[in-house]
Image: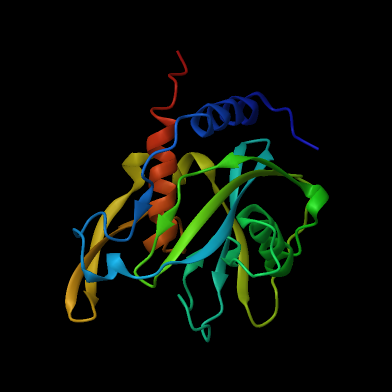
Amino acid sequence: MLDDTPLAQAQIARVRAALAQDADAGSSDFDLNGAGPEVTAHYRPAAVLVPLVPRAQGLSVILTKRASHLKHHPGQIAFPGGKVDASDADPRTAALREAAEEIALPAGAAQVLGRLPTHKTVTAFEIHPFVALIDPGFKPQAAPGEVSEVFEVPFAHVTNPTKFLIEGRRWRGARRAYYTVPFGPYYIWGATARMLRLFADRLGAEPSAD
């Protein structure tokens, strides 16, 4: 299933070590803004898959661009995922189901390595992120009406703290700051960027090549 290139294998080892760390309080859309009244909202459970694909040049991360007409986070860059349904056994099941629905990922093409701490959004979702290795032969297909594009970005880029910026915009009458980690034409921001930043912090500095 996996590409045995030395760089990819070294990155996978770092990922496993990061996921083995003790759980912490997680992250939220409030981290750069202080707690607001939204923090007391009833959070609805959601789950996402953080799909890592071993490539000759190292790991890459599969991301999606959400369709522009969706109710929540239209047009944004996101991990495959969505709300946890009553029929889902647990958030892990929901993450894999959503990945199957959104990018046609077969269950046998994903090896779940573990989970990151939860992330709470200003839209009152508590997201459970699950990290998985994906068969490099997998060919994603965007779900019509839900996903406008499926693409890959280098893992080394979106987990490098120096690539992150803090930007802001007005939302519901107040200015809010948020993380971004742009890559080429893709503006990765909000909850997705915050979860990637937490992942980056857990991974720590990349070992020197010396």
The single residue placed furthest to the top in the displayed view is 210
Q: Residue at x 76, y 64 (%)?
A: 104
Instruction: State the residue in front, 29 or 3.
Output: 29
Q: Is residue 178 above or below residue 155?
A: below
Rendered location of residue 135, percent (x, y): 76, 44
Q: Residue at x 45, y 51 (%)?
A: 118
| Picture coordinates of residue 2, whole percent (x, y) | 76, 35
Q: Is residue 200 above or below residue 96?
A: above
Looking at the image, is 40 positioned above or below residue 12? Answer: below
* Image position of 146 (left or right of 172): right
Tell me: 89 left or right of 162: right
Residue 15 found in image quarter: top right
Residue at position x 18%, y 58% from top? 34
Residue 82 appears anywhere in the view: yes
Q: Residue at x 38, y 65 (%)?
A: 121
Where does the image place residue 124, in percent across and percent down from the top left? Answer: 39, 70
Q: Nearer the viewer, residue 172 or 24?
A: 24
Q: Quadrant of the N terminus?
A: top right
Nearest the viewer among 147 and 131 is: 131
Where the C terminus falls, by quadrant?
Answer: top left
Q: Is 64 left or right of 71, judged from the image as shown?
A: right
Q: Quadrant of residue 178?
A: bottom left
Q: Is residue 19 left or right of residue 198?
A: right
Q: Is any atom of residue 189 visible in this view?
A: no
Q: How far across and how far down the image is residue 112, in percent?
A: 68, 42
Q: Quadrant of residue 55?
A: top right
Seen in the picture, residue 130 relative to 89 is either above or below; the reply is above
Q: How many marks?
A: 0
